[in-house]
Amino acid sequence: MTDLTKQDSRSLLCHMNIVLEDGSTAESTKSSGKPSRLNIGDGSLSPAFEDQLKDLNEGDKHQFTLAAKDAFGESNPDAVHYMDRSRFPADMELEEGVIVSFGGPGGSEIPGIIRDTAGDSITVDLNHPLAGRTITFELEVVSVITE
């Protein structure tokens, strides 16, 4: 086990574009005006993602591409579930592409995407929507937070 240095446990407040392989933008913090906080050293980011952040400072702009396993993970077939329609509220529209939420540990919510409906069988994918995809990140560091 290694000790975290002050450098390793800082956070970056960044504007970020998440760009797909076809060049389309999946998400942008600039459009909402709310930068994201990226915590380095707390285990919330992949080692490859953290490696891209370690030398960044306020005002820096950085673009990098990560393979699926280092971005949002590979798509896991075990995260695709087949559920009976009766498990959903009777008035809920259940069609392909609809995002539904399930209660998770500690009161958290786990989002799922309906992938298919066939009679009373609903296929729900609990993978991250960007799992299995190579992602390009475009970052602009707004500030560095050290604690």
Image (tube, grey):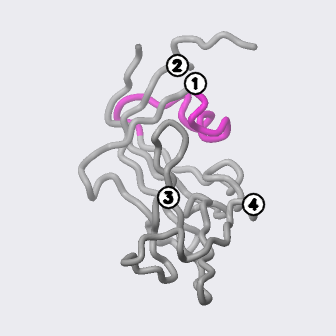
The residue pinned by badge 2 equals 9
The residue tagged 4 is 78
Residue at 49% x, 63% y is 19
Looking at this rendering, what residue extends furthest in the bottom direction?
A: 119
Q: Amino acid at mark 3?
A: Pro
Q: In the shown orientation, is residue 64 left or right of residue 142?
A: right
The quarter of the displayed image where residue 57 is located: top left
Is 58 a magenta residue? yes
CB-based contact (under 8 Å), mark 2 and mark 3: no
From the image, tell me which residue sits under label 1. 41
Of labels 2 and 4, earlier in sequence is 2
Neighbour class for label 1 at 10 Å: few (<14), some, many (≥20)?
Answer: some
Q: Amino acid at mark 1?
A: Gly
Please provide percent x and percent y for residue 131. Answer: 63, 60
Q: Which labelled disc corresponds to residue 49?
A: none
The kind of residue tagged 2 is Ser
Expressed as whole percent of the image width and height from the top left, the position of residue 21 reads: 59, 69
User: How busy is the neighbourhood of tag 3: few (under 14 within 10 Å), some, or many (20 plus)?
Assistant: some
Q: Do the numbered discs 2 and 1 sit on residues whose CB atoms are within 8 Å? A: yes
Location of mark 3 (residue)? 111
Residue type at tag 4:
Asp
Magenta span main SS: loop
